[in-house]
């Protein structure tokens, strides 16, 4: 919406002037530069938000996307301090006389991200062991995990499985609790941590589809059961369900 308004700013200005209600900000060069910067930065934030959404997003991949964005913020901050707007096309089109204050806005975002994800980053070492067990040094991991990491990294067959499977599938099928009890326990711990926003939005969409105008008298219990089935990723075992069904013979 913000991008659409920015692209139509001249048309909006003309329309308001024709109606006799001009808006002085649309003729203010400084205000337009601020708007252009907001358009660019919100575009990047929206792209990050999309990357953080979706099913089966592990905490390790979410944190990787956040760290990547923080690195980009550091890059933008340094470039804007030197009046380099190469990564801000809308702002570049306005040809601002100075961009130092926008570097300050990037600094505020860096601080906000650092504060927001401080707790998650404190688990960085454990996440690295979970996500990339073949890239860690055994001497750098906790003492109780060192033998298991050495055993895992020495198994060429497991390494081939790791390279060809998704992370969850690898831990589920090939990292046994008997051979790797601590590693398996940590994998279960971090596999169960996920972003809730996507699940909430998905459930709300299912709710609006289920409780429509023609089905407004659904009871809460019925609606809860339908949402549970609609939101579940567990496929129903139709064969087992039909076998347990008692058939009614004709008399």
Image (spheres, rainbow, N blue to C red):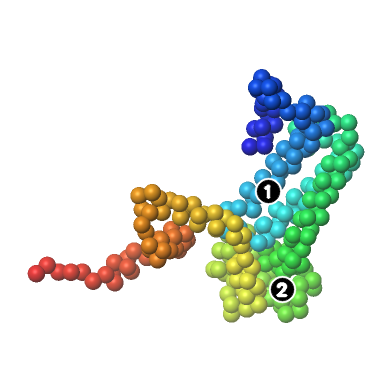
Residue at 62% x, 66% y: name it: 193
Q: Is residue 179 above or below residue 63?
A: below
Name the secondary structure under disc 2. helix
Q: Nearer the viewer, mark 1 or mark 2?
A: 1
Q: Is residue 14 above or below residue 104?
A: above
* Spot occupied by residue 10 in the image (x, y as percentages of width and height): 70, 24
* Spot occupied by residue 7 in the image (x, y as percentages of width and height): 68, 29
Q: Is residue 98 above or below residue 210?
A: above
Residue at the spot of label 1: 48
Of all residues, the one furthest to the left in this rendering is 251
Q: Residues within 10 Å of mark 1 (few under 14, many from 20)?
A: some
- Can residue 204 be seen here? The reply is yes
* Spot occupied by residue 187 in the image (x, y as percentages of width and height): 63, 70
* Spot occupied by residue 20 in the image (x, y as percentages of width and height): 68, 22
Dividing the image into 4 quarters, which one contains the N terminus?
Answer: top right
In-image side of 238 versus 164 (left or right): left
Question: In front here: 203 or 192?
Answer: 203
Question: In front here: 218 or 123?
Answer: 218
Residue at 66% x, 19% y: name it: 18
Residue at 81% x, 55% y: name it: 111
Q: Quadrant of residue 128?
A: bottom right
Q: Quadrant of residue 31?
A: top right
Report the disc number at residue 10.
none
Q: Earlier in the sequence, mark 1 or mark 2?
A: 1
Residue at 82% x, 29% y: name it: 29
Residue at the spot of label 2: 150
Of all residues, the one furthest to the right in this rendering is 82
Dividing the image into 4 quarters, which one contains the C terminus?
Answer: bottom left
Q: Are marks 1 and 2 in contact (CB under 8 Å)?
A: no
Question: In front here: 81 or 238?
Answer: 81
């Amino acid at each position: 919406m913000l991008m659409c308004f920015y692209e139509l700013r001249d048309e909006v200005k003309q329309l308001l002037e024709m109606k006799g209600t001009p808006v002085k900000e649309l003729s203010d060069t400084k205000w337009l530069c601020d708007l252009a910067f907001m358009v660019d930065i919100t575009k990047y934030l929206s792209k990050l938000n999309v990357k953080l959404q979706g099913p089966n997003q592990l905490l390790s991949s979410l944190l990787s996307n956040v760290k990547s964005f923080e690195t980009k913020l550091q890059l933008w901050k340094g470039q804007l301090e030197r009046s380099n707007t190469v990564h801000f096309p809308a702002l570049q089109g306005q040809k601002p006389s100075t961009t130092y204050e926008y570097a300050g806005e990037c600094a505020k975002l860096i601080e906000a991200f650092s504060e927001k994800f401080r707790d998650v980053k404190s688990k960085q070492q454990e996440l690295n062991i979970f996500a990339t067990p073949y890239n860690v040094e055994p001497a750098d991991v906790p003492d109780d995990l060192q033998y298991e990491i050495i055993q895992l990294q020495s198994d060429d067959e497991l390494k081939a499985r790791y390279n060809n499977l998704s992370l969850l599938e690898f831990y589920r099928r090939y990292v046994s609790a008997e051979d790797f009890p601590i590693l398996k326990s940590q994998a279960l711990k971090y596999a169960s941590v996920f972003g809730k926003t996507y699940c909430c939005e998905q459930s709300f969409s299912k709710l609006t589809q289920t409780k429509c105008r023609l089905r407004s008298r659904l009871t809460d219990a019925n609606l809860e059961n339908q949402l549970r089935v609609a939101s579940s990723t567990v496929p129903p075992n139709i064969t087992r369900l039909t076998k347990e069904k008692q058939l009614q013979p004709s008399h």
